[in-house]
Amino acid sequence: MDIILLKDIEKLGEKHDVVSVKPGFARNYLIPQGLAKAANKSNLKTLNHILQREEAKELEKLSDYKEIADSLDGKVLRIGAKSGAEGKIFGSVTALQISQAIKEQLGTDIPRKKISLVEEVKTLGTYQAEIAFHKEVKGNISFEVVSE
């Protein structure tokens, strides 16, 4: 039985994928849970309209993401951390702290889930973080960990 997924389901597919599953799995679990709907002509036509709208929205967002990535390029954030005598900090710097620093220092709101650290930050110094705005748009930002 062919169905249209309404949410991402691990080991089955992503949202708006048309997949083939056993009829019992679709009727007894996926459809009643609101995770999928039958892939008939009217639902497929609706899916095509939804995909076209989402694609247009993504193209608009893509230019915005590129502008934000360009504005972050070359900027250096300062993040304060408590440290010992040898320059080791207590704990480590996380993506959440970087997200908050971007919001406070640059005025741009970036979710922490889009930020990934290249290496663990356990000492004072300068580091890089990668920001994945979109599959096609990625940016880097430098941050300096200083003693409070």
Image (spheres, grey):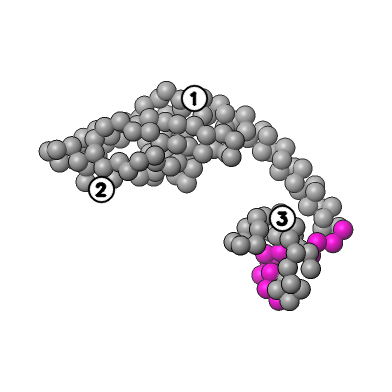
> Is residue 121 one of those drawn in magenta?
no
Highlighted range, magenta = 28-41
Q: Which residue lies furthest to the right in this view?
A: 41
The picture places residue 20, in percent across and down from the top left corner, at 75, 64
Q: Residue at point 40% right, 36% down?
A: 129
Front position among marks 1 and 2: 2
Asked whether disc 1 touches disc 2, contact meaning CB atoms under 8 Å apart, the reply is no
Whichever of callouts 1 and 2 sits on the residue coming sooner in the sequence is 1
63 relative position to 142: left or right: right
CA distance for labels 1 and 2? 30 Å
The picture places residue 136, in percent across and down from the top left corner, at 59, 35
Query: What secondary structure is marked by label 1?
Result: helix
Q: Name the residue under label 3.
A: 17
Q: Which residue lies furthest to the top in this view?
A: 74
Q: Quadrant of the C terminus?
A: top left
The three-letter code of the residue at mark 3 reads Asp
Q: Mark 2 points at which residue?
A: 91
Whichever of callouts 3 and 1 sits on the residue coming sooner in the sequence is 3
Q: Residue at point 78% right, 52% down?
A: 47
Q: Residue at point 21% right, 35% down?
A: 147
Asked whether disc 3 touches disc 2, contact meaning CB atoms under 8 Å apart, the reply is no
Asked whether disc 3 touches disc 1, contact meaning CB atoms under 8 Å apart, the reply is no
Report crowding for label 2: few under 14, some 14 to 19, many 20 or more residues within 10 A (C-alpha): few
The three-letter code of the residue at mark 1 reads Ser
**Which mark, by number, is residue 71?**
1
Q: Quadrant of residue 1?
A: bottom right
Front position among marks 3 and 1: 3
The picture places residue 101, in percent across and down from the top left corner, at 37, 36
